[in-house]
Image: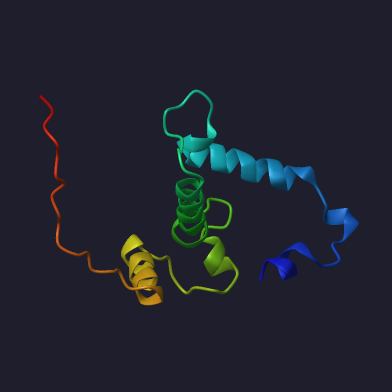
Amino acid sequence: MFNSFLGGNPDPVHISASYAERLNLSLRMGMRRYTRLTNAFSKKFQNHVHMVAIYTVFYNWIRIHKSLKVTPAMEAGLADSTMEWADILEAMDLESPPKKRGPYKKRQTEISN
């Protein structure tokens, strides 16, 4: 999937750093994890990856963009209407249903004298 995205034959006339800079600005404004001097950072890389994925879903499927007047997914013909978080969660559960947790086990603590 990624190889088709990274490959191709782009038209040099349409190559611009402005697109990358606009994406960087949108990420920084939309997620506090990308701004400086914040305590909303991820200690684990996997948590950071998940947060970026959640923001990407929001940005493309839920958020109506002012210039487009619709979501990017609707503009691309991938959706007929805006999605809600409940729709996203339902799709995630269909992909991999939540696992049931086992019984809670108390830790045995050792009391030292």
- Vertical comparison of 40 with 7: above or below: above
Residue at 73% in and 68% down: 3
Q: Nearer the viewer, residue 102 or 112?
A: 112
Q: Nearer the viewer, residue 105 or 27?
A: 105
Which residue in the rendered view is the most extreme toward the front?
A: 113
Count of labels in the image: 0
Q: Nearer the viewer, residue 21 or 43?
A: 43
Residue 100, image x, y percentages: 23, 68
Residue 2, image x, y percentages: 68, 66
Residue at 54% in and 36% down: 34
| Quadrant including the C terminus | top left
> In screen coordinates, is 3 left or right of 106?
right
| Quadrant including the N terminus | bottom right
Q: Nearer the viewer, residue 40 or 26?
A: 40
- Vertical comparison of 32 with 81: above or below: above
Which residue in the rendered view is the most extreme toward the right?
A: 12
- Vertical comparison of 26 with 53: above or below: above
Residue at 51% in and 51% down: 49
> In screen coordinates, is 10 left or right of 108?
right
> In screen coordinates, is 4 left or right of 54?
right
Residue at 42% in and 33% down: 40
